[in-house]
Each structure stands twice: as structure tokens, then as C-alpha cells.
Amino acid sequence: MKQAQSVWSRELLRQALRESLRKLNPLVLWRNPVMFVVEVLSAVLTVIAVRDAVTGGDVAFSGQITVWLWLTVWFATFAEALAEGRGKAQAETLRRSRSETFAKRLLNGERWEKVPALELRKGDLVLCEDGDPIPGDGEIVEGVALVDESAVTGESAPVVREAGGDRSGVTGGTRVVSGRIKIRITADPGETFLDHMIRMMEGARRQKTPNERALEILLVGLTVLFIVVTLSFAGFAQFMGVATSVAVLAALLVCLMPTTIGGLLPAIGIAGMDRLLRHNVIALSGRAVEAAGDVSVILLDKTGTITLGNRMASEFIPADGVTESELAQAALLASIADETPEGRSIVTLAKERLGVRGRDIAPPDGAVFVPFSAETRMSGVRIGEREIFKGAPDAITAFVQERGGSIPKGIQEAVDRIARSGGTPLLVADGAKILGAVHLKDILKQGIKERLQQLRRMGIRSVMITGDNPLTAAEAGVDDFIAQARPETKLQVIRRYQQEGHLVAMIGDGTNDAPALAQADVAVAMNAGTQVAREAANMIDLDSNPTKLLDIVEVGKQILITRGALTTFSIANDVAKYFAILPAVLGEKYPLLKVLNIMHLATPKSAVLAAVIFNALIIPLLIPLALRGVRYREGSAMALLRRNLLIYGVGGVLVPFLGIKLIDLILVAVGLAR
């Protein structure tokens, strides 16, 4: 997607402020039970503060508690609104672009009618030509086109999409640069990828994940528990003759409740999905996002994921009686006009072997270049009577045999050796003479070894899927491989790992990947792939980049770690607030309990106020961490748990002690501690 707007921009902050006030509506806030209870208490204390103002009660104290309880609720709604803000701005842009799009809906034959894109239904056929926007998600059934997908993926380079094969899928909102294609619409309005993206960005219909629901149930349980504890304490205090006002009891309840994580939980989920969207991945299932954080086995295709996908020239093998320079010179001439990645790599290797620079290369006068075609499977150049060609071994062999030549025994052995190693052999011929072979090798992607080592440190097993020779597995450093992989083989492997208790992730794009994608716990389909693959998956990669699976796992782990870290911090906070409020409430009646006032807070009222103020302020102070996410570091589960407890558990105990003491000093300094 295009560059996201900063969440701290003035426009988004104003929008978040307005939205946070709307979220104070009890009919909206009840979805967050913890903060809903705080809002109810705030409303009750507002009535009490008004009563104190009329009757001459302690309105200064009850009024301050009331203000800070309202601020606690507002900070929570502001955190959620801020997390949603950037997504809503992007969603509005996408929605506006969709509403302005028209489509050429085919009636029969070549006749078409112009209709709004929002009227298209699944099964409709539409025509797209040069410059036309693609009006909806679909599959190309006829034709080939160069498609600009920058509006969705942010990538400026157009890509080829064509009928048949694994690159037939197109997304609404993209545009045909050149070509003519017929598209069968595969999604009704409201079900397209852009609709999913809009909903995710807005957060309005974001479904809570299973872990999020479980945590929410825990928070509700703790809230109910502390309500019972507070009511019991009120009865206990009355029995002992200790006067406790409603304001103090409300402060005690709010400080004991897990308000910090309750206020930040929605923001953590929304920000996590936003980070996933920034990787141009649409999650069709919240369960898949969380499963990504717990994945222990990843299935990776060799081509395009571990290797570059485009085979590169790595070696010239001359025939007997031919020097490497002669072979390199002929291969260079045959490839000067070849714009394929393979052809460019041959030119690069030839320049390296011959020691020449690009500007020193010029085609001979009268040279006629013959481009590669699927029929001939070779390309080259004719210079007068001379014919220099390179291509597939059988095509070049037939070429030289027509001219009375044959393939040398040594070169045939070289071809067989290259094929057995998983490479692709090409032959170079000058008329009736074969000069030698070129070894095209699927080159490992830069940094892929380090990424696989990173997965290993995360405790994730990498399995390479290859349809040919498995030698690349050892070179890349994967933990296992599946050679000569067929659809049923992939499915069996996933089931075997799942039966052993593993969560399995896989990425695919073809119809043959669909069974395995449907079985995998985290199934990522490339957006350019077939409709069958996309329907079987629970995530869609808009960039169609196979390596994205590694990023998805990291995002999933970061969401889980952020939620766990802030939950730990929130619960640990209660220890300090316990030592602040209980001595303040009971200390005057029972002086021995003043020994618990280890922070030496000035007065009972300043102690209660300081605890309530800290409880409110910690929410906005943690908003940047909730939006950015806790940084994920590779390591075992026990190492991560120890680090989490050390930083957010111990920190959650110590920070409130320092914060409450500092606030108490400020209250004394400004005269609000009485």
C-alpha cells in the first residue's frame, strides 16, 4: 500500500479526539467491560460530587477523584481511536476510489455496458483494456495484460497477469497499463479484498481473536472479583468503625481493576493488524494471526522464496577444442538483445569472463537478432551467413543436426550433470558447431541463510518444498526438504506435523497448492495466484511475495508478546497501588498499619489521589508502546518469558512506586494533599 500517514499527525490527532468522545457513549463502551465499569463509577461519583457541592461536603476530594476517573475512561477510548485513526483515513481513500470506478460488463459476445463497479456480482464478466481500472476481484479468463498494482501494493513496477496458470488473479482497484483481458468477478460487494482491507483499517468490524476473547474473559473475571473484594472491604471497614466514603471505595476498585490492559487491549489488536497491513497482508481470520505467532513449522517453496526464481548464469562449459573466451564471446553475442533475466545474467557473466565493460559491447554491423519464442525455445543473432544461437539442449541439438553437426559427448555429459544438480543447461551453437554449455543456476536470495537461521533461533523448523533436485536445501541451510513434491505429498507432510502437535504455516499460489493451504494453520495465498488458492487460504499477500511468510510470523509473535507484556505490567501495577491506598484508608484507625506506607505518602487523601492519577496517566504513557508493539527478539519460550517478567513484571511493580511518590510530592507542592 502507499505510505501510511503518521499516527501523530495533527489531522489524525484531531480525528482521534473527536472519535474518542463518541466512544464514551455507554452503548459503544459496553464492549469493553472493564472501562464500562469505570465509566459507571465515574457517573456515580459525578452525582456525588454535585451533591457535595450543594450540601457543603468534601467536593474538592470527590471532585478530583471524579475528574481522574473520567480521564481514565477517556484515555482508553483515545488510545483505541488513535489506533484506528490512520486506518480510517486510508480506508476512506480506498472507499472513495471504489465508488468512482465504472466497469465494462459484458452482455454477450463483445457487447458491453458501462455500470458502477459496486453493482458487479460474482460471476459477471467484465472487459478491461488499456488504461481501464480493474473494477473488482476476479480471475482472468481470456487475454494477457500488464497491470499497475501500485494503488494496492505500493509497488510502482507493473506486473504481467494472464489467463491460465498461477498468475490469473487480479484485485479491484488496480489498473491495466496495456493489454486486453476478460475477467470473471469472484466476489460480491462487501466481500472483496479491498472490503476486507477497509474493515481491517477501520477496526469497526474487527473480530476479536480467540486469545483476545480469552484475555477479555480473564479481565472481566478479575473485575468481578475486585468488585466483590471492594464491597467486602466496605463491610469490613464499617464493622471496624473505619469511615470510608464512596469516592475512596471507587478509587480502590478502579486501582485494583486491570484498567491499564483493559484500556489498551483494543489498541493493541488494531495496531497489530495495522502492522500486518503495512506488510500488505490481509488476514481473513483473526485466528490465523494468532496462530502465526505460535507457528513451529514453515513450508517454503524453493523457487521464488529461497531462491530468486530467475535462474542466473553461473558457469561456461566449453566443448573440446573451444576456449572459454570463445564460448563467452558467442554467448554474449547471442544474448545482447535478450531482455529476460536469464539473458541478462549471461551477458553479465560473459562481461566478467572477458573483462569488458557494458559500453564496450556493440553488436556487429548487419546483425539481425532473433528473439526467444516458445516454439523454437532458443534465441540468437545472424551476422551475414553466420548463425549464433543459444537455447534448450534439444532445440540446439536439432538446430546443429539440420546443418550437419552433432552434440559432442563431453557436452552431453555436462548437460546431464547440470540437470541432475537441479540447474538448467543451455547450449550455445555457431552454425553446425556446438561451442559449449551454460549452467543456469537458481541463486539463493541474499540474506536467506540469515533469515532461516533467525527462524531456527525462534524455534521454527523450516521445510523446503522443491519439485526438482534437493541440493539447494543443504546450500540454504533449511532443516528439511520435500523433493519431487506433489499436492498430496504436501498435504501428507502438513498432517504429519500437525499430528505431532505443531502449528504449520504455508504459502502458495496455484490450484495444486489449495489442498495443503486448506489444511495449514496459517495459509497465505498470493494475490496474483488462482482463485482456488485464495479461497483455501486465511491470509492474502497483496504483493505476491513468497518470503512474506517470514514477516507474518514475526508480526504474529509481536502481537502476542505485546499483549502479554502489557497484561503483566497492568497486573503488577496493583502491588504498588495496594501499598498506597490501604494504609491511607486504615492507618488512622490502626496506626500499626502505617508501617505499610513504605512510600511515605503525605496524607490519606494525597495517597488515594496519587494512586488514581497514576492509574489514569499510565494509559496514555503506554499508548506509543501499544501502537508500536514490543520488540520481538529471537529465543526460546522460557527465555522470552523470563525477559517479559523481568522487564514488565518487575518494572510493573517498581514504576508505580516511583510514579505515585512523585505525584504525591506534586500534590503536596500545589496544595491538593489536604
Image (cartoon, helix red, strand yellow):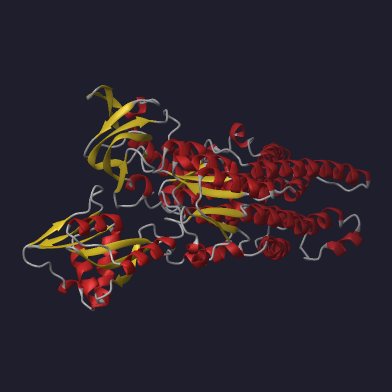
Q: Is residue 560 above or below residue 120?
A: below
Is 510 placed left or right of 105 in the picture?
right
- Of all residues, the one furthest to the right in this rendering is 240
Is 373 placed left or right of 551 in the picture?
left
Do we see residue 72 in this rendering? no
Q: Is residue 134 above or below residue 485?
A: above
Towards the viewer: 437 or 228: 437
Is 613 placed left or right of 308 in the picture?
right
- Image point 57% across, 38% down: which residue? 207
Towards the viewer: 51 or 652: 652
Residue 618, quarter of picture? bottom right
Residue 496 position in % (x across, y down): 64, 48
Q: How many marks?
A: 0
- Of all residues, the one furthest to the bottom in this rendering is 355
Residue 520 position in % (x across, y down): 58, 44
Towards the viewer: 16 or 432: 432
Give the quadrant of the C terminus: bottom right
- Of all residues, the one furthest to the front in this rendering is 404
Residue 131 position in % (x across, y down): 22, 40
Residue 152, quarter of picture? top left
- Image point 24% across, 47% down: which residue? 375
Residue 198 position in % (x across, y down): 44, 39
Do we see residue 213 in this rendering? yes
